[in-house]
Image: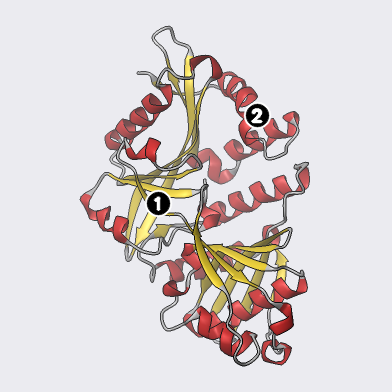
């Protein structure tokens, strides 16, 4: 079969070429270590594998990463493949091997009785749509932070703490994420190893990238009654970017107040987020009303706007009819931290 798992030697030759695209500012030896770390991490060993598509002569023409994911909707779990790092080698460009490896992965998913495939496109939708994928999320939310109009008295008194994400109690986060996920239309199920895998990746980039890769931070809020809210964020230039916001209903306002205080503390001019953190996902909570009543001075109209991302477009290919309704879910509940 043309689609085969890559050996360590073959993977190294692929990485030598992909570094030009996906190095994230890593030096060549760090880029190799970064990918090796992912494959040998506890979660990665069980759920990540590199595949190559070979020509009739046995040469590797294209490659990709294949992830074993579990998607959850209500009480039911669905096995799905995540697809990432689809790449055609330089000498085989323009010969259709990118499409061939996508088709081969789809056929493998069908044989393996997967409910669907998930990927995040940085090249638009058209290429993947021809193979049956549907774009289900590409909205970016931006909240303008106007320090001069902020009412500091309204924001005061919030009890929260911030720690680096890689130092978090993942057992606690996992427990509350599972509880929160049951209320969402669908999403990627987590485990302790999954949280740790994501944290190690980001920490490695923060420590080794020459691009000043931002450190992920974790805001946590608890009410003493078993409810917890947390937000994972990073600071990049004038922006505070919320990668994930998971909240118990009674603490939605409190966690947003904490996010806003952090933005002011770091002199950020904007708070950015994927659509998964938009107000509709928190029933009964209006972000604009919150900004009017809790953050800004009276009669000040806050600015919130939405745009289309050109990167990280969430795309889904359902293979079982049972998950087809996910295509109509708006806004997309997929979190940025689940980006493959």
Quadrant of the rendered image containing residue 224:
bottom right
**Residue drawn at x 59%, y 91% as measured from the top left:** 299
| Residue ID at (49%, 41%) | 46
Between marks 1 and 2, how big is the CA–CA gap? Answer: 31 Å
Q: Position of residue 65 (x, y in %)?
A: 49, 34
Front residue (pair 91, 11): 91
Crowding near the residue tagged with mark 1, few <14, some 14–19, many ≥20 C-alpha atoms within 10 Å: some
**What's the residue at 33%, 34% (across, down)?**
106
Point 68% across, 79% down: residue: 160
Which marked residue is nearer to the observer: mark 1 or mark 2?
2
Residue 283 at x, y percent in the picture: 41, 79
Element at badge 2?
helix
Q: Which mark is residue 106?
A: none
Residue toward you, 168 or 216: 216
Number of numbered discs present? 2
Secondary structure under badge 1? strand
Q: Position of residue 326 (x, y in %)?
A: 31, 57
As drawn, 333 above or below 209 = below
Residue 169, quarter of picture: bottom right
* Direction from residue 237 to residue 100 in the image, left or right: left
Determine which residue is flagged by label 1.
70
How are the colours assigned in the image? secondary structure
- Seen as rendered, the residue at the extreme left is 321
**Mark number displayed over residue 20:** 2
Lateral position of residue 302 relative to residue 102, left or right: right
As displayed, is residue 13 above or below residue 180?
Answer: above
Pick whichever, 110 or 224, lies toward us.
Answer: 110
């Amino acid at each position: 079969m043309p689609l085969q798992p890559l050996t360590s030697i073959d993977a190294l030759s692929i990485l030598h070429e992909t570094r030009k695209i996906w190095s994230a500012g890593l030096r060549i030896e760090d880029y190799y270590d970064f990918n090796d770390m992912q494959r040998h991490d506890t979660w990665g060993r069980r759920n990540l594998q590199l595949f190559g598509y070979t020509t009739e002569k046995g040469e590797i023409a294209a490659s990709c990463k294949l992830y074993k994911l579990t998607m959850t909707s209500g009480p039911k779990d669905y096995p799905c493949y995540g697809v990432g790092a689809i790449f055609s080698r330089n000498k085989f460009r323009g010969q259709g091997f990118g499409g061939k490896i996508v088709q081969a992965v789809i056929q493998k998913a069908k044989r393996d009785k997967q409910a669907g495939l998930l990927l995040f496109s940085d090249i638009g939708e058209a290429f993947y749509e021809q193979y049956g994928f549907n774009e289900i999320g590409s909205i970016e939310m931006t909240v303008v932070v106007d320090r001069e109009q902020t009412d500091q008295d309204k924001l005061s008194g919030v009890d929260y703490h911030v720690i680096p994400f890689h130092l978090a109690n993942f057992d606690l986060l996992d427990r509350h994420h599972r509880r929160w996920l049951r209320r969402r239309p669908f999403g990627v199920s987590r485990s302790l190893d999954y949280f740790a895998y994501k944290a190690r990746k980001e920490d490695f980039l923060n420590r080794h990238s020459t691009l000043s890769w931002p450190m992920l931070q974790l805001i946590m809020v608890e009410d003493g009654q078993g409810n917890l809210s947390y937000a994972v964020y990073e600071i990049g230039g004038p922006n505070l970017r919320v990668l994930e916001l998971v909240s118990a209903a009674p603490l939605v306002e409190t966690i947003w107040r904490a996010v806003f205080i952090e933005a002011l503390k770091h002199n950020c001019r904007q708070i950015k987020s994927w659509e998964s953190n938009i107000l509709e996902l928190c029933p009964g909570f209006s972000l604009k009303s919150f900004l009017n009543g809790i953050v800004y001075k009276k009669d000040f109209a806050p600015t919130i706007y939405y745009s289309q991302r050109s990167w990280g477009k969430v795309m889904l290919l359902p293979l079982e009819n049972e998950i087809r309704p996910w295509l109509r879910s708006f806004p997309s509940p997929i979190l940025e931290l689940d980006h493959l």
